[in-house]
Image (tube, rainbow, N blue to C red):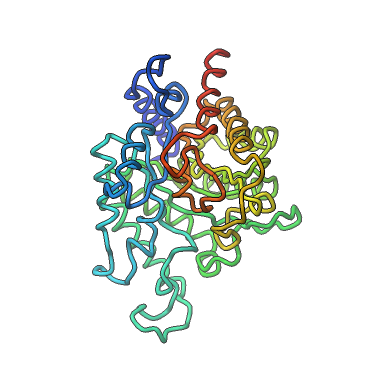
Amino acid sequence: MKNLPRFSARVALLAASLLATAPAAFSADKPATLKDAFKDYFAMGVAINQNQFTGKDTNGMALIVAQYNAISPENVMKWQVIHPRPGAEGYDFKAADAYVEFGEKHHLLIVGHTLAWHNQTPAWVFRADDGRSLEGTNEADRQILLGRLHEHIQTVVGRYKGRIKVWDVVNEALNDSSSEADTEVLRRQSPWVRILGQEFIEKAFQWAHEADPDCILRYNDYSIENGPKRKRLITLIKSLQAKNIPVMAIGSQTHANLVWPGVELEDEALTDIASLGLPIHITELDVNASAAGQRNQSADVAQNSHAGGGAVSSAEQKGAEQYGRLFSVFLKHRKDIKLVTLWGLTDRDSWRGVNAKALLFDGNWQPKPAFESVINETKSAGAAK
């Protein structure tokens, strides 16, 4: 296993490469694009779906290529899609291959998402039987589950070695409690945690590094802006670092609403996370403007409705204001942030539902006030240099 100092150097080289190959800065006679506007700060990415990278959504495909220099797969690399059945014959790489080929064709930074998560993982993975019978109900033991995790990571990461540059290795493993008194670090409901404890995280990173020693490996989670969960994140990562586990970047999802996180909280969170000495990636950014979204700060899929009620009054303007505030903080921390990824291309694609008006482009692929707000933050940052 390589020593940890190499990881930071690898990330720095990747970031420098992205900035060096970005297009020329936007000007008054050239329409602004996100990748141009942020070329001196960090890469700009977007989560994309199958219709977009296969060309069924031609407008969406064109918008991705015009605006972004990095991509993440919304669903096609999650375990239930890429490895729905047990055994070597149980993989389905068609959609994932098309995603990677799209990224290569357009010279985009390609992110893989995600190797180990408690959601969107087939039931057979956690069963003691071979998964071929619906009657198996006993939970897999440690040896069985580790074997399946190893085989999955070796196969998937190995297939895209040298092509996928960043992997979300472990997703959302932290205890989600908002209580300071709850000192349990990991999510107790997760079968990964229940059967393997922290070992599943350690092995997942080790095996991903073995499968592709040059890939940047991320730990990814939501609501780590909040104090109790942030402390658990820092405890976990320091524990992994003490064991020389190859965690190379922290993914902060930043699923926001119109008022949360505020500027002070976001600034405090990024400062604390940066103290770990690892690059920060904003991995799943959106701003939920639905009425229901203002009552819930969690991005746990089990706690979120795709409908979310109607949008709040003046949703477009309030969303633009929140996007501006968040990007002002991201730019303040530009030395630590290497990538910002929007979780979806347009409002029609958002996992939050169209009423959430959560993204930078509307359902007709047109820029919203939030887009202009984000671009304007780069002008302020440039003036402050």
Does residue 103 appear to the left or right of 251 in the view shown? left
Between 217 and 91, the one nearer to me in the picture: 91
Which quadrant does the C terminus fall into? top right
222 above or below 13?
A: below
Q: Position of residue 79 (x, y in %)?
A: 38, 62
Q: Residue at x 57, y 28 (%)?
A: 333
Number of marks drawn: 0
Does residue 323 appear to the left or right of 115 in the view shown? right
Does residue 294 appear to the left or right of 307 in the view shown? right
Q: Residue at x 57, y 37 (%)?
A: 276
Q: Residue at x 38, y 34 (%)?
A: 68
Q: Quadrant of residue 289?
A: top right
Residue farthest to the bottom?
135
Q: Position of residue 336 (x, y in %)?
A: 52, 30
Q: Residue at x 34, y 32 (%)?
A: 66
318 above or below 355?
A: above
Q: Quadrant of residue 156?
A: bottom left
308 above or below 66?
A: below
Residue farthest to the right?
181
Q: Quadrant of residue 133?
A: bottom left
Between 76 and 58, the one nearer to me in the picture: 58
Between 188 and 57, the one nearer to me in the picture: 57
